[in-house]
Image (cartoon, rainbow, N blue to C red):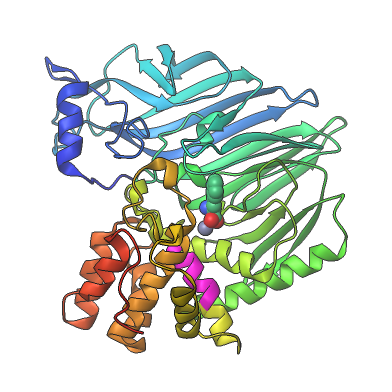
Amino acid sequence: MTKPFLAGVTAFVLSCATALAGGVFTGADGVGDPYYPKMGNTGYDVQSYDVKLKYRRSGKIRARTTIEAVADTDSGAPATGPSLGGFDLDFRGPEVTGLTVDGSESAFSRTGQELVVDPPSNIADGSVFEVEVRYKGRPKQVSNPDGSEDGWTKTGDGVVALGEPQETPSWIPVNDHPTDKAAWHFRFVTPREKIAISNGELISEEQTEKSTITEWEQSEPMASYLALAAIGEFRVDEGEVAGIPYLGVVDRRIDKFVVDEIKERTETAHEFLADVAGPYPFSATGAVIDPSALDFAMETQGRPYYPSPPPLQLVIHELAHQWFGDSVSVERWKDIWLNEGFATYMEWLYEEETGGESVAARFERVYDANGPSSSFWNPPPADPGGPQNLFDPAVYNRGAMALEVLREEIGDADFFEVLETWAQDNEYGNASTEDLYDLIEAVTGSPRPDSFDDWLYDPGKPSCSIC
Ligand code: TRP
Ligand code: ZN
């Protein structure tokens, strides 16, 4: 499920990183994302991941991930292009004990985050193939360019595995870029007193004498960075929100009333967000509250993660990402403001619509409170300057302010049409800031306002066209 992007950059990467001799193509070790050159791989499109993982009380795991993919040698002519002679997966996990391609043991090697696969025979372009990776040991966290650490993270009674943008390879071998979304199935075996929570629908739960076994199905497309595992001792609240299965999962050490509180907040957020952005894109919803060393909440698909009981504002933020981020995902990480600016805007809009401060008033207050030399204004949200600034507050706040500039320039009717059309037309796909410009032009019948560009791209405090 890949959408081609950055054609020029990809072509450049391919020409230097791949061999194309005798009709055999070797996939590149990155998809050409400028901020993360080694994220994702070329040569194939993943259709589905099947993750089977056993977690022991010692913290050790034994796992087997099966990936179904279609060979895609970028020749533009599936089935007649060169065959795929080798490819990479992204994996930062423990020891790989074996790897098969279409059932035959395959050679592999590891360099950095790349798991380099050298299959026993070439794979015909356009054909479906299956890779099975077996691994065991103790997964570790991943360090990010901004100094944060996430991924496989120990908790008091187990582990949480989540993060952004490159943490999933800490426990699953993946094609780690949001442009390659896939269907997912998980099966976890944990010690009997614990349970493993993941994305999508809980399709089976079973207890044996020693173990608890859960299976999860995420049938709508999901980008790898949105994968979730939370293993521990929880209160699990099964119900329904917005007409779909809801699962609220709260660490046992947290007050019981939080179980009802998080469900109410999730319900409130669903109602508000569906009004603004259209029908919720996934077939399950919920929340996981599990204290850990991670100090951020995360929009893990269908079931956001919170390190502590969240205020309604944060629930709105993480659920807003289900539309803006999870369903409509960035095409390259530089476009992160399309996630964080939109989710922040939804927080502000909720305030406005429930009798609190209007977004316009908030905009002016914040505009006046931060002088021209304030670091509040940098970096510009649509060009944050590198992966170390991916989650800079300016990406969130100035990104949301840029949307308010757009709203006041084009008027409420067109603005709200842009928001909903963005979520619906790009459902389960990828989009960029340029795609947003195109949509604004299609909805309003004129080019986007210049001031919107300034708010997205100009360093320093932008002048205020709407004050
Ligand atoms: N995407 C998260 C959000 O809802 C934020 C986030 C993920 C984050 N990883 C991070 C923030 C690392 C700071 C550091 O906004
Ligand atoms: Zn966010």
Q: Position of residue 58 (x, y in %)?
A: 79, 22
The secondary structure that dominates the magenta segment is helix
Relative to 83, 111 lies left or right: right
Quadrant of the image for the C terminus?
bottom left
Q: Is residue 70 above or below residue 246?
A: above
Q: Is residue 462 magenta?
A: no
Does residue 402 appear in this view?
Answer: yes
Q: Is residue 87 above or below residue 365?
A: above
Relative to 219, 407 lies left or right: left
Q: Position of residue 174 (x, y in %)?
A: 45, 33
Relative to 112, 162 lies left or right: right
Res 417 → quadrant: bottom left
Name the residue located 22 percent from the left edge and 29 percent from the top edge: 125
Res 44 → quadrant: top left
Q: Nearer the viewer, residue 99 or 112?
A: 112
Does residue 327 appear in this view?
Answer: no
Q: Is residue 341 magenta?
A: yes
Relative to 336, 137 lies left or right: right
Q: Which residues are magenta?
A: 340-348
Res 194 → quadrant: top right
Name the residue located 60 percent from the left edge and 86 percent from the top edge: 356
Quadrant of the image for the N terminus?
top left
Q: Position of residue 70 (x, y in %)?
A: 32, 35
Q: Position of residue 322 (x, y in %)?
A: 51, 61
